Amino acid sequence: MKKSVFLGALTVSSLLAGAAAAATLDDVKARGTLNCGVVTGLAGFGAPDANGRWEGFDVSYCRAVAAAVLGDPEAVEFIPTTGKTRFTALASGEIDVLARNTTWTFSRDTDLKFDFIGVNYYDGQGFLVPKGLGVTSAKDLDGATVCIQTGTTTELNLADFFRANNISYEPVPIETNAEAIQQYLAGACDTYTTDASGLAATRATFEAPGDHVVLPEIISKEPLGPLVRHGDNEWGDIARWTLNALITAEELGITSANVADMAGTPGTNPEINRLLGTEGELGAMIGLESDWAKNAIAASGNYGEIFEKNIGENTPIGIARGLNAQWTNGGLLYAPPFR
Amino acid sequence: MSTLTDPQQGSFRLSMLLSDTRYRSYTFQFIALVALIVAMAFLGLNLVRNLAAQGLDISYDFLSSASGYDINQRPIEYDSQSTHLRAAVVGILNTLIVAVLACVTATIIGVFAGVMRLSNNWLVRKIMAVYVEAFRNVPVLIWILIIFSIMTVSLPAPSAFRGETPTSTMFLDTVAFTNRGVYIPAPVMGPGAWIVILTFVASILGIFALRKYAMKTLFDTGRIVPTFWPSVALFFLPTLLVHFILGRPIGLEYPELRGFNFQDGIQIRGSLIALWFALAIYTGAFIAENVRAGIQAISKGQTEAAGALGLRPNRIMSLVILPQALRVIIPPLVSQYLNITKNSSLAIAVGYMDVTGTLGGITLNQTGRAIESVLLLMLFYLVISLSISTIMNIYNNSVKLKER
C-alpha cells in the first residue's frame, strides 16, 4: 500500500516536471537569460570575436530573441554545439533555441520531435576545390577523396549525389570544420563539401582564397533555420515571429537606426505601428511586452542589416543575397503579415 | 538415566528460517536479492515510462532501414543502400581490425621494451625508460592526433606523384606513402592459388612438428637438433617451389595513380595507421612495465642458478625467467588488451569508421535513436571485452603454476 503511494507520488512529480519543462517562456524569464545553442565557431555565422563576445548571423538571431523576451540583447548564454551534440542539447532542455545553421528536414521536424520555426538562410551543399585540381564540375569528381563533416545532412546528400551520377568517391569523415580545413589544405582530400555558405566562410579564412573555387553545382536544398522543442507552441510562436519581425522590418524599411523614432510615435503605415506596438496588442498575444519587436530589431538590426554586417558582400565571407533576398527583390524571404 | 534429545531430523519448520543459523543467512540473502531485483525493475520501468512520456519509445526498427551514408573502409560489401545494421557490422569489423593489430604490435613493443629496460647496458636501459615515461604519461588521444597530423602534413599528397617530373616517387615502385595512407601491392589469386596457400599452411605445421621433435629428442637423448635454419627453409622453400612449379598463380597488383587517387593495391588509410600506432606505442609502454615487473618478480637466485649451470643469457631469459614471469605478466596484460579495445573508440578523432563512428556516430545522428544506439554500443564493447577476458583467462590457466 505504502509502495503504491510512493509510486503515485513519483508519477505526479514527474508529470509536474514535464509540465514545468513545457513552459520555456517562464523558464527563460525566471532564469533571466536565454540559452541559445550555436556553432562551435564558423566565421560570419557564429564565433567569438577578439574580446570573446559572440558575433555572427545566427548569433544575432539569438540576441533578437533575448531582446524580444527579456528586453536585453546581452542576456544570452551562448552554448556551442557540434553537429552531433546539437539535437541532444535541445531535446534535453539544455538550450531553449538552436540557431546553428541546421537544415530543416522532414525527419528532424517529425521523428526527432523538433519544430523548425522558419528559414533564416536558404543554402545548398557545394564543393570547394583547389583551382590547381582542374575540376570545373562536381561530376568530374569521380574517384576523388571528399572531406565531409560527420553527423550532418551533407553526408547523406553526398552519398545520393554520387550514386545518382554513378561515380565513386572516398569519404573522409571529420568531426569539426577546423580539422576539415587542415586536411583539405594539406591535400589529404581533393575536395571539401558542406553548405555553400560554410564553404564561402571557410574560404575567406584561407591565406590565398583566390586559389580555391566553389564548384557551380549545388547538390541539395538546405533551408537553414532556428528550431525549438516540439510541444511548447507558445515558445515556438515567439521564436517564429521574432524571425518574421526581423524579415518584415527589412521589407518595411525599419532599421536599427530608425526603430526608436518609429516606435516613439505612431506613423502612417498601420503594419509598422502594429509591429512596433504603437497600435494593437500583438505583443500580448504571444505573452510579451508591446515593444518586443522594437527591442528585437534594435538588438542588431533587421534581417538585411544582420546579413550585410556578418556575411554580406562587404565582409570577408562575401556572400551575395541571392535566394536570401526579400521576395520583392526576387528572393525567397516572405514573412506572413503582422495583423 | 538420561534422555538425549537429538534435533529432530527432517522436520523443517518455517520459523527455522529465522531462528536456525543454518538457514538464516539464506533467508537474508534471498530478501536482499528480491530487493535488488525490485529496485532494478523499478529503475528500468521508470526509464521506459519517462521515455515514453517524452515520446521516445525504445525501438530498434531503424536498424533494418537503409543507412544512406558511405563508409571508406569496408571489410565487407557495403554501400549507402545497405541497412544501418550492416553499417554497424562494418564498424564492428573495423574496431576488431584495429584492436587486433594494436594488441599484437603493443605486445611486441612492450615485451621488447620491458626486457630492454632491464638491460645491463646503461644507454639502452635509459632510452627505454624515456620511452616508457614519455608515452605512458601523455593521453592516448594526443598521440592519435599528433601521429595523424604529422602524417597529413609531412607526407606528400597523391598529386605530388603526378606529372613528368614528380616531386615524389613510389618506394621501390611498389609502395606509395601519401598523406591519405600507404598503398601497398595486393595479392591477386589466380587458378591454383589455393594449392600454394595449402602448402604454406602445411609448412607452418611442419615447423611446429620439427620443433616438437627437437624438444623430444633433447629430453630423451640429450642431443640438440638444429631448428633455426631448417625452420627458415621450411617457411620459404616449399611454398616458393610450388608457386613456381604451378606457374606463379599468385600475382601482385601494384598501386597505380589514376585520376585523383592511387587505384588497385591495398590502401592502409592514414586514420588506421595513426590509430593503430598510437594505441600500440601507448599501451606498449604499459605492457613494458608489466613485463619488467614480471621479470623482477622472479628471484635473482634463479638467474644466478641458471648461470651457474652454464646457460647463456638468452637461454636464461627464454627458458628460465620468461616462463615463470608470464604468470605475473598475463593478468595485467588482459587489462591492457581491454584498454586497447576500449580506447579504439577514440577513432572518430581521426575519422576512422569504427563502431562508435558508424553506429554511435552517423547512425545515431541521422536517426536520432541515441539511447538505442548507445545501448547497442555498450552491449558490443561488453561482449568483446568479456570475450577477450575469457580467452586470456584460458591461456593464463594453461601457463600458471599448477598447484597440487
Image (cartoon, rainbow, N blue to C red):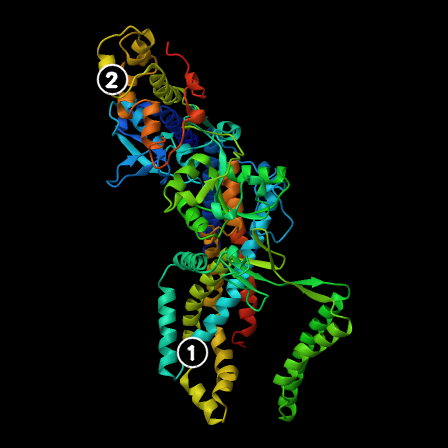
Q: Residue flagged by tag 1: what amino acid is it? A: Met
Q: Residues within 10 Å of mark 1 (few under 14, many from 20)?
A: some
Q: Residues within 10 Å of mark 2 (few under 14, many from 20)?
A: few
Camera-side residue: A82 or B328? A82
In the picture, measured across the screen, residue A14 lies left or right of residue B187, that is: left
Q: Position of residue A101 (x, y in %)?
A: 42, 33
Q: Classify residue B247 by image quadrant.
A: bottom right
Q: Position of residue B344 (x, y in %)?
A: 48, 56
Q: Chain of mark 1?
A: B
* In this view, A176 is above or below B185: above
Q: Chain of mark 2?
A: A
* Residue underneath mark 2: A258
* In this view, A133 is above or below A63: below
Eye-nearest disc, 1 or 2: 2
In the picture, measured across the screen, residue B400 lies left or right of residue B225, that is: left
Is residue B360 at least partly visible in the picture? yes
Q: Residue flagged by tag 2: what amino acid is it? A: Asn
Q: Say if mark 1 contacts mark 2, CB within 8 Å.
A: no
Q: Position of residue B189 (x, y in %)?
A: 72, 62
In the picture, measured across the screen, residue B315 lies left or right of residue A90, that is: right
* Residue underneath mark 1: B116
